[in-house]
Amino acid sequence: MSRTSFALRFKAIAGVAPLTYLLNLRMRFAQQGLREGSMSVSELGLSLGYTTESAFSNAFKRMTGMPPKRYKNVFAGMDRPTSRRGIA
């Protein structure tokens, strides 16, 4: 199958172009990783296929409107279950 045929078929099924789908998927993984806080921004970017922290940061900011370090500071820990201690 040619690249064009694949792209057209993918878009017909998924509703978006393959590279757009990949970018959105990477950014969802990035947001989750930043909220969990288990990796540095650089390590997370490399794990998602970006060659530099700068490339990752630029793509993340373009998609979310804020740099990854700020996102991490604002949303860190949001995926963790809350403790019910102290609640009667």
Image (cartoon, grey):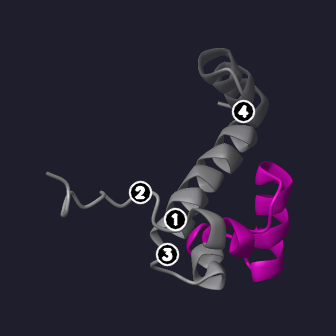
Q: Circle 3 — which element? A: loop
| Residue under the point 66% across and 39% down | 21
* Residue type indicated by callout 1: Arg
- Judged from this view, the residue extending furthest toward the left is 88
Q: Which residue is mark 3?
A: 37
Q: Position of residue 30 (x, y in %)?
A: 59, 61
* Label 3 with label 1: CB-CB less than 8 Å: yes
* Residue type indicated by callout 3: Gly
Using the numbered discs, state the Cα–Cα distance from disc 3 to disc 4 in whole angstroms: 40 Å
| Residue under the point 74% across and 32% down | 17
| Residue 60 on the magenta span | yes
Q: Which residue is mark 1?
A: 35
Using the numbered discs, state the Cα–Cα distance from disc 3 to disc 2 in whole angstroms: 10 Å
Q: Earlier in the sequence, mark 4 or mark 1?
A: 4
Which mark, residue 79? 2
Q: Earlier in the sequence, mark 3 or mark 4?
A: 4
Q: Quadrant of the N terminus?
A: top right
Q: Which residue is mark 4?
A: 2
Answer with left or right where residue 29 lies relative to residue 36.
right
Disc number lying in front (4 or 2) = 2
